């Protein structure tokens, strides 16, 4: 079984996922799909037709982040909260620092990326889109 986070945005899905791709790498698996591609959806405004109905950022076979925009004319409302975080487990301390610094830019750092008592480098933040992230690199024996 694999579990992949699914994020919702209020018209920022393409921008946010492109930002995540610029930091984490990967490709858009299947491209970016828009509401305008749905047959019979002429009732949407031109602005709403440009919203993302579905996108997957495939970072590896095991790691994917999926997303879409809400649709206000269908009574969808985005409520940003603190109930969900994307937790990254980088391959090195340096990669963790790069992920943390890049993704937290323009956001709100909750805990800086630094060595913590459980033998890891850890940090958490809300990105500029309101999504929560944790970066945790477990130190290997002999690493500081």
Image (cartoon, rainbow, N blue to C red):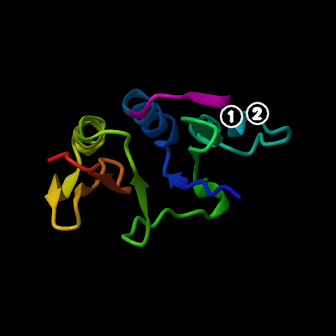
Quarter of the rendering containing residue 101: top left
What numbered label is drawn on residue 37? 2
- Disc 1 secondary structure class: strand
Q: Which residue is mark 1?
A: 33
Q: Nearer the viewer, mark 2 or mark 1?
A: 1
Location of residue 58 by image quarter: top right
Q: Residue 73 placed where, x, y %?
A: 63, 56
Q: Residue at x 46, y 42 (%)?
A: 12
Instruction: Using the rendered view, name the quadrant where residue 31 is placed.
Output: top right
Magenta includes 2?
Answer: no
The residues colored magenta run: 24-30
Residue at x 42% of width, y 37% of height: 20
Badge 2 marks a residue whose secondary structure is: helix
Left or right, 120 with respect to 73, comes to: left
Q: Position of residue 138 (x, y in %)?
A: 31, 54
Q: Residues within 10 Å of mark 1 (few under 14, many from 20)?
A: some
């Amino acid at each position: 079984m694999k579990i992949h986070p699914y994020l919702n945005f209020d018209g920022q899905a393409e921008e946010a996922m492109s930002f995540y791709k610029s930091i984490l790498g990967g490709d858009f698996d299947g491209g970016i799909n828009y509401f305008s591609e749905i047959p019979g959806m002429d009732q949407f405004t031109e602005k709403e037709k440009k919203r993302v109905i579905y996108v997957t950022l495939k970072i590896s076979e095991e790691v994917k982040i999926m997303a879409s925009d809400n649709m206000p004319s269908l009574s969808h409302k985005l409520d940003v909260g603190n109930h969900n975080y994307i937790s990254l487990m980088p391959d090195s301390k340096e990669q963790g620092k790069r992920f943390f610094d890049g993704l937290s830019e323009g956001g709100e750092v909750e805990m800086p990326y630094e060595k913590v008592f459980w033998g890891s480098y850890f940090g958490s933040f809300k990105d500029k889109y309101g999504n929560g992230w944790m970066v945790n690199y477990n130190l290997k024996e002999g690493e500081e």
